[in-house]
Image (cartoon, rainbow, N blue to C red):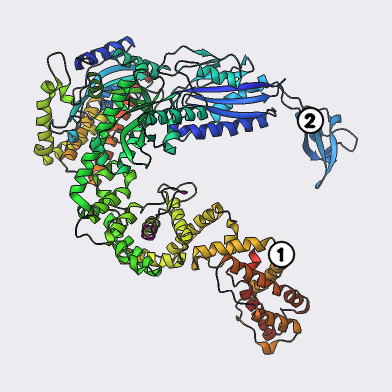
Amino acid sequence: MKHGMNFQDLIAALNHYWTKQGCVLAQPYDLEKGAGTYNPETFFGSLTKKPVNRAYVEPCRRPADGRYGENPNRLGKYYQYQVIMKPAPANIQTIYLNSLKAIGLDPKEHDVRWIEDDWQSPTLGASGVGWEIWLDGMEITQFTYFQNMAGYALNPITAEITYGLERIAMYCQKVDNVFDLRWNDTVTYRDVHLEQEKQFSHYYFEETNVDHLRRYIKECEEECYALCKKGLYLPAYDNTMKLSQYFNMLEARGAISVQDRTNNITKIRNLAKACAKAYVESVEKKEEVK
Amino acid sequence: MLQNALLEIGTEHLPARFMAPALAQLKTLAQTLLAEKRLAYESVETFGTYRRLVVFIHGLAAKSADEKKEIKGPPAKLLKTPEGNFTPQSAGFAQKNGLKPQQLVVQETDKGPFIFARVHIAGEKAEKLLPEIFTRLVTGLEFAKNMVWEESGLRYGRPIRTLIGLYGTKAISFSVAGVKSGRYTRPMLSYGKKPIKVERADKDYYVNLLKSQMPPILVLPQERREALIKSVSNEAAVRGYRADLDEGLIQETVAFTEHPVAVGGHMDLKALTLPRELITTVLKQQLKMFPVVDKQGHLQPYFIAVRDGSSANQTEVSNGFKKVMSARLSDAVFFFENDKKEGLSTFHQKLQNIQFLEGVGTLADKAQRVEKLAVAVCAKLGRADLQETLTYAARHCYDDLASQVVYEFPELQGYMGGQYAALEAARPGAAPYQAAAAKAMEECYWPLSSSSSLPTTEAGNILSLAGKLDTLAGNFLIGQIPTGSEDPFALRRQAFAVVRILLENKWSLSVADLLELLREAYAAQYGAKWTETLTQQLTDFLRQRLAVVLEQRGHAPALLGALYLWDRQPLCQVENLIAALEHVQSAPEFAALRESAKRVQNILQKAGKVAPRPDEKLFELPAERNLYRVACNVPVCTARSTEQYLQALKNLHVFKEPLEVFFKDVMVNVPDEKLRQNRLALLAFVRAQLNQTGADVSAL
């Protein structure tokens, strides 16, 4: 028997649902990132007073989590579905629960538990308060009210909803191996992603050139600061994202000591702060002109 | 007429850990506010769920009490001018208090006569006062961690979404963080959004109204607790077993449900090969599930999860829980099998790369120090028979910190080390002491909380003590000393445990001796850094915890201040002495002795250096001779039980009369220096005898 929605239908249903909630359906940002929060829509979007409502699929890369496609639950690249609403509507919890209905999960038929879980990202200098949401014991969503971004205390407050798409799909389709997920009626997640998992695991764990990576990191850092000075916060932030990815690659390669790790996290946080500062200053300047 | 009042704060899901403190705080806060507003009431009750905090005021007066106040003004001489007119000062004072100057009165005070204004403040209607009271109740609540969610910037545990204020049948209107109060509450979040109208402030009515929803909301924590225990127990009983009703998990579950319903299911048999605590940790901590056990307490291959709400679709929900549990348990099996392949010696190698504390070396260094200290304590206690056990246990007690299981489940530190050690102890060719060492390792972090058990074996107690002292010293050495409410490394808890181990085991080991052994353990690497100040800081720190432990054991901790050299004797003796002092302290005949002892002390304090014993030949008066004779004959206190201390203290009463006579007949500070010194020496000798138990009689 065929259970649950196909993977692509799940995404389409979420797109449809959040479109109806007034969200701009954005497309994934075209750079590697460790989590959807890194998307510039989210990073810059949370910083100013302007309302933002966005929904988008975001592929995430976690080089160290890759398992050559051999582990049924671990992936080096997977998808998050992100929703950003600012200011957070007063009935945002209900809006979220209705999205579960839209993908075939009636909250009345399941145990939906909101477990305290305060998210933070040391590299973005960001933190928030919220929950991880359990469906019958399984974590399917991270729900966060952002409180700080790049060191700025935020107000208005952005709500960020992050769905773990593969987990939800595995639950709905009742499969135990992520590669068995039906992407559509004829193609599986294995068909789409297995080769990527194999090759990228191989690359991240065995083939990356550590010297190159260290050089890239240095270059990205220089470029980011130079661009910030010119008020070009968007390309500057691209360099922050790239640096972060190179750092994750070094870590997957086992080339980072504890001290090194702390230093690099600080380095990325400082870059993120510089980009945020350039952005906030440019917004303020525009407002003065008005 | 008395009416009831009700406040409901409707929030988004409050974290379970916030619940009990919030309800306790709300109650105190309500009592304080009602008292401040002089509103009489019969009682205040608080209850609720993670989505609704409720304050219920029973029998609230319709009006606050009138208040008569006398306000002190300027001195009486400023009332009128010599011509008989009111001065600007008195007229101003009258005006400020809403009176005419003629209404002012003059009253005597201990600083002379003053002008007073007698004001009468009329009571106000309860419904006029309630908006402010409710507002301040809502905003006065403090949470362990706060957030902002709307533009007013109110900091709160989670967003407030609804507010209800009722006084009898009347809605009280107020608003907080953009939310206006009303009389509507909400059903459970997952079950629709149709508001529920609350007609009146009546507890039974309100509780039943919520209970009549579908699914029912059990707003009283006690009812949720009963429903939870019943539901979970039934679920176990239908399988012929019972549930392991862990109290912590019950409390947590009560705090994060509105209507708890048990969902049972099977566990893979393969998982049962894991150590028990590992399974129960996965179940309880990670998944909030209750384990199932047989009559003997053996784990059975079932789990009981709790869902919040209805019991529709139970099979699918159970399958969902089972899937998550299986995945977690198979991870645990994977980690455990990997760890078994590595073994303690491999872990031990890795300790060299794990920092214990910046500035005091790695975990390998710590293990070395703890081994040295544990073996030294063992010798001091005359337990040479435990030396091999302790050497092994101390060397390996931190090995599990390098294991995968403890990396994933930090709360299993110690326990897992014990498991791995026991596996190795069961192998052919293992040394006989390894089994005992495994037990000591398993319990080397005990007591885990201030009231939980000490390690069950002597070796375990010594190991736990050594590990904790090493942590204390390490932190103190690098300047991480707790101050005020700041104690990020929970060092007070460690010191508390050290005191308990010393006291409850009745070890004949003083704090001073122990710190000396600790200093020696640190000497090889950090000898130069260890100063007298550090020893003193550690002594003081332990002394503060000793005071707390003594108080918990029913003693008056202030008496510690009267003890000489408490750190030079075993703590059980300190406790005995304090128990004895409590007995004699309140006796009237003791008061006279204490007064004389104080005189002795005062004189000696001013005297500078004095010989410890007088020269009999220099005595001039019978009172001197008599006092000396009594001091020489008083029995010396050698034993250390409470009764013996009590007897020794009672023996001191022989000093009462001779001392009184001495102070009546003898002048100490005479011009003849030799005579004066001899009399001072007599008093010094008397003081030593008075304080021979170790307690300063003059300071009691």
Quarter residue A173 falls in: top left
Does residue B403 lie above or below B181 as drawn?
below
| Residue B64 is covered by the magenta coloring | no
Does residue B454 lie above or below B410 as drawn?
below
Q: Position of residue B267 (x, y in %)?
A: 28, 32
Label 2: how many Cα within 10 Å (few below 14, some 14–19, many 20+): some
Magenta segment, principal secondary structure? loop
Placement of the C terminus of chain B among the 4 image quadrants = bottom right
Q: Position of residue B324 (x, y in %)?
A: 28, 29
Residue drawn at x 32%, y 22% is B317
Secondary element at tag 1: helix
Q: Which disc, if any, is residue B119?
A: 2
Query: Which sits earlier in the primary sequence, circle 2 or circle 1?
Result: 2
Label 1: how many Cα within 10 Å (few below 14, some 14–19, many 20+): some
Quarter residue B122 falls in: top right
Q: Position of residue B33 (x, y in %)?
A: 63, 30
Identity, as a three-letter code, of the amino acid under mark 2: Val
Does residue B234 lie above or below B625 as drawn?
above
Q: Is residue B76 left or right of residue A167?
A: right
Which of these two is toward me, A276 or B671?
B671
Which of these two is toward me, B26 or B256?
B256
Which of these two is toward me, A2 or B106?
A2
* Residue stretch rendered in magenta on the structure: B448-463
Per the image, the residue denoted by label 1 is: B591
Alpha carbon separation for disc pair 2 and 1: 48 Å
Q: Which disc, if any, is residue A253?
A: none
What is the residue that sits farthest to the bottom in this orientation? B617
State which chain disc 1 sits on. B
User: Could you tell me if residue B255 is visible in this image?
Assistant: no
Instruction: Mark 2 vs mark 1: give the one in front.
Output: 1
